[in-house]
Amino acid sequence: MVTEGDTLVGLRLADGSVLERDAIVVASKPHARADFLAPLGIVPKPFEMNDVEIGSVIDVEPTGATSVPGIFAAGNATDISMTLMASAAHGNRVGAWINAELAGEDAARAVAEHRAQDFERLRPGSRRVRRAAARLAPAAAVRSGPRRRRRRTR
């Protein structure tokens, strides 16, 4: 770079000649810094435009999920064209997917535990077993008409 005081004059080339310019723009090559994920099997892939590598990104699904279950990525580590606001918005969206996945796992576990407890409490031939069987029976097998209520004695 050739300057006169604080003013840019141009750019000195390798052969010594000066290319006069008012401004110089330098492109960076952004790379996802994810070396710490390599032991897990996540390695950034090259990002190319017009057959020219211009950086690297972490490959993710639309939910932010990587190829390793439970590991997510978001922002400009997954798309180098994202600006600050787009990266923040993407992180927010991926966070919602992570929350949904965890909530779904918790709900499935709670339902399974509840069902297991219910069936453990049922005794063969008990009233609860008969009621459960009636709920699960086909519609044709269910008794029609009003139900009789037993009177409680005090």
Image: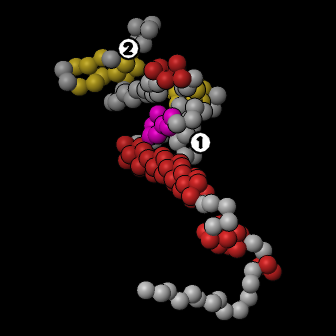
Viewer-closest of 63 and 14 = 63
Q: Amino acid at mark 2?
A: Arg
- x, y percent for residue 74: 46, 40
Q: Residues within 10 Å of mark 1 (few under 14, many from 20)?
A: few
Q: Is residue 57 left or right of residue 91?
A: right
Viewer-closest of 148 and 23 = 148
Residue identified by numbered label 1: 61
Q: Say whether residue 93 is visible.
A: no
Viewer-closest of 135 and 35 = 135
Q: Which residue appears farthest toward the right when viewing the image?
A: 140
- x, y percent for residue 140: 81, 80
The residue that appears at 44% across and 8% down in the rendered structure is 14
Secondary structure beneath label 2: strand
The residue that appears at 28% across and 24% down in the rendered structure is 8
Q: Which mark is residue 12?
A: 2
What span is colored magenta in the figure?
Answer: 71-80
The residue that appears at 45% across and 37% down in the rendered structure is 76
Q: Which mark is first along the chain, 2 or 1?
A: 2
| Vertical order, 115 against 141 (above or below) | above
- x, y percent for residue 18: 38, 15
| Vertical order, 115 against 21 (above or below) | below
Q: Amino acid at mark 1?
A: Glu
